[in-house]
Image: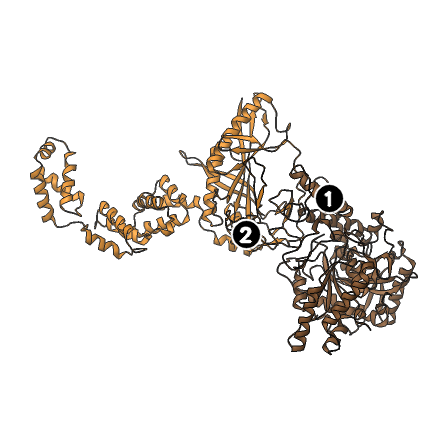
Amino acid sequence: MSITSATASELLAKMNAGEVSSEEITAACLAEIARRDESINAFLSLQGETALQTAREVDRKRKAGEPLGKLAGIPVALKDNICATGTTTTCASRMLEAFTPPYDAHIVERLRAADAVLIGKTNLDEFAMGSSTENSAFKITANPWNTKCAAGGSSGGSAAAVSAGFAPLALGSDTGGSIRQPASFCGVVGLKPTYGRVSRYGLVAFASSLDQIGPFARDITDAALLLETIAGKDQRDTTSLDAAVPRYTENLEQPLKNLKVGYIEHLHEEGLHEDVQKATQQALDVYQSLGAELIPVELPHARYCVATYYIIAPSEASSNLARYDGVHYGYRAKQFDNMIDMYAASRGEAFGDEVKRRIMLGTYALSSGYYDAYYLKALKVRRLIRNDFEQAFQKVDIIASPVTPTPAFEIGELTDDPLAMYLADIFTTSANLSGIPGVSVPAGMSQNKLPIGLQLLAPPLEEERLLRAARMFERETDWHLKRPE
Amino acid sequence: MDYTVIIGLEVHVQLQTRTKLFCGCSTRFNPDHPNTQTCPVCLGLPGALPVLNREAFHLGMKTGLAINCEIPSFTKWDRKQYYYPDLPKAYQISQYDLPMSQNGWLEIEIDPETRETKKIGIIRAHLEEDAGKNSHDESGRGHDSKVDLNRCGTPLIEIVSEPDLRSAREARTYLEELKLLLTYIDVSDCNMQEGSLRCDANVNLHIQQENGETIPTPIVEIKNLNSFRGVEQAIEFEVQRQWEAWQETRLSLHDVPKETRGWDADRGITLEQRGKEEAADYRYFPDPDLAPVTVTDAERDKVSSELCERPALRRNRLEKEYQLSAYDAAVIIDQGLAFADYFEQVAKGCQNGKQAANWVTQDVLRELKEGGLEISAFSIKPEVLAALLEKVESNEITTKSARTVFQELLKSEEAAPGVESIQSIIEDKGLAMVSDTGALEAAVQTVVAKNEKAVADFQSGKQAAVGALIGQVMREVKGADPKVVRELLIKKMS
């Protein structure tokens, strides 16, 4: 197995055995990026020099026998909506094209403390709004399995980077599926933790009550490793949870006994791609063969998820993005007549269409006279969706479902039909609305040779259960071992 | 036709926390070093998140309880959204439908003659963060406007009264009483020059028609009221302006939306600030970055127990307990908590409240004003002043001598001269009351002999002639009791 296709755990073992250095790994990743990123467009910026410096320092520490962090010497890519000093954090927007944050996000502090090698910032849909990375102001990320296809989004750059061999690990953010969907499209593991499991401090907010940072990896073990590095209470994020972080990697190989896997019957009727339906069924069969019990679950309000999501997320976004007004930092229009005009021109010129669409949706939903009918109603439905899951999880341990109705679509295929793009979030948004953890695991290939993911959901703070259940499936299958050519 | 004036005040008070409401930046008033007390949170940088300052919430609860508000067990934070360069997040974190305190009142005296009081209702008091400060080029040369964000994020409590105030005078009294209360309970310095206490007034008239109907005139919000005098004058102006406007236009509350006018203190007029545009839509919604706050009964009781005696109650108590005039009690209370404590220590120490009141409101207050001092920095400590006044009480020295001792104590090189200094000054200056009647009688004898005319005047019935002679005897015998001298003189001359 080559350096660029190995998992982080494998690379750590090789480094500890003295077979390879972090500098060699980092250089190999940078070489692969140089060779192929022109056609993939996973990265918005690279920190090659500082990455190599960090790698050399880790190598020195390792040689000297000094204590090392969990990810010592492992290259990690960061979605470009996570603040890190020393480079720009653009959110793939003209608005923040030149913005260099003066501080590190909480998870960046954790990664640095774990001796990870931060290699570059990855592409995304502008301000994480989208499901294809086509809404980036700078470039469109291609799917490493087929460059005509979308990598998914909004964390498409991070998913593609892990899939294409550019970095063994990456961080993304998931507001309505933005980790799980591109993970599914690109054939890698992507995990959205419980809301509050990982601090949002330093994650540029899209929809604050839904946003959550999570790992991309080439297998479940690596996802567990990265999660245990970044999870935990942070005093600067009052929504982060004050619950002990289990050693997720420790019990990963122990199968769950008497596992009850829930599945959603009626969702299978709704325009599901044949290959996806087949992969999901096969995955359920795998669990059955492992002795798990399959139990149909009712989520009566699941069909309102997309509608609810597309009220709550844009409402919060309209408020969160109001600060980009050209006054204190970020883009300012060159020509304007007065203060109001300066705001309008700066925002009008710097935001892309999808961002504007969502700001307008959210502004409308929060407006006096509409608030009760839209925002407040959506909050009530959100409560019902959460209740659905609470009840379902009294009967089952995890819930299995597709991640997306179809494998990766072609670039440009849905850009003129935002509603179709929104509707594809049917399986993912419920986890954000109810705050529960979810993971996408490679679980099949379409007839067109595109990866298909399986989504597993668990109750709040049950990441350990989620990862062990996912690992049970992964051990029985070899989808996670496949790499794009 | 007649009218009633209807006034409600919205008062913003800066709570005196060390750090801002949602970050660790200093709240120090520091206009000379703009943008030095800022961080990613109060600058509203991407990815930064607010964390509630518990001390600010605590001071907010203290304030709410002091103005007799209910403190609900559940309160939350909302975003008030509008664009302005001094508001870097483009929303202010405030409280909308579930404020942290509500339904209170503040009692004010509305007639000093009759001592009639009135309870002014308080609708709510909620916490919010302050904005920064814009400054514009006023030279007319078109230079850039500047923004200082040092103040941005400073904790404010907004106290909204019911429209219970019926005159500019009442509004001023309410504001003065509120300020006094908040400084007593130590939640704010209420410094109006530095903007720690700001006031907006909502004013309109209820016109009584001949047919018995009442018509309300349009409500005007007056902004930029930054002194007590300004509040009173602006409302007086506005009442007159609205009365004239009514006579001219006959427009009522229902015909025009609320108008905002600014007080121009230099010209003594209010000026239209914002056009009669549509009401601003702040699109309030719960801030998803901040968890709601729950308050238990125990927490509420604890804060309640920390509250000191409110100034209004203390004013009444001082009057009763020390037999003070209403005027003296008010003067003492108005100087603040530390001053009132000082007075009470002196009064208790010397066992004469009236005498203590005379001394602290005249001698002590004069020295504080002349020296620009706070009572805490005053060199004569209350136990020393009490000991001095005790000597007057027990006829050891005269009031006049006590004033001399007081001045000598002030001149002392010691930072805070002790009680023993009093005795040494009395001895040095020979101020002890002379009980040696021999010496006194000799002096009286001499003075009577020297002043034949005055003696003759006295003997012909002019009582006033004694006064001049008393002075002469006192000069001869320092520390003589003037009462005794008077008696001896009269006896001698009769």
How busy is the neighbourhood of tag 2: few (under 14 within 10 Å), some, or many (20 plus)?
some
In the image, which disc is placed on residue A336?
Answer: none
- Per the rendering, the mark at residue B36 is 2
Amino acid type, residue under disc 2 in the picture: Thr
The quarter of the picture where residue B486 lies is: top left
Identify residue type, mark 1: Glu
Residue B5 point in image, percent of width and height? 53, 30
Q: Quadrant of the C terminus of chain A?
A: bottom right
Q: Subunit of mark 1?
A: A
> Observer-nearest residue: B334 or A66?
A66
Say if A9 sits above or below A387 in the image.
Answer: below
- Does B474 sit above or below residue B242? below
Relative to residue A369, is residue A273 depicted above or below?
Answer: below
In the figure, is residue A156 to the left or right of B147?
right
Q: Which residue is drawn at 54% across and 23% down?
A: B244
Count of number-bearing discs: 2
Which sits in the foreground, A22 or A317? Answer: A22
Subunit ID for the residue under disc 2: B
Labels 1, 2: one chain: no
Q: Colour of chain B?
A: orange
Residue B123 visible in the shown view: yes
The residue where tag 1 is placed is A349
Assign a secondary structure to mark 1: helix
Horizontal and vertical percent position of residue B208: 56, 24
Q: Circle 2 sits in a helix, a strand or a loop, which is it?
A: loop
Identify the colour of chain A in the image.
brown
Instruction: Establish if A232 lies above or below B187.
Output: below
How much space separates mark 1 and mark 2, taking CA atoms? 31 Å
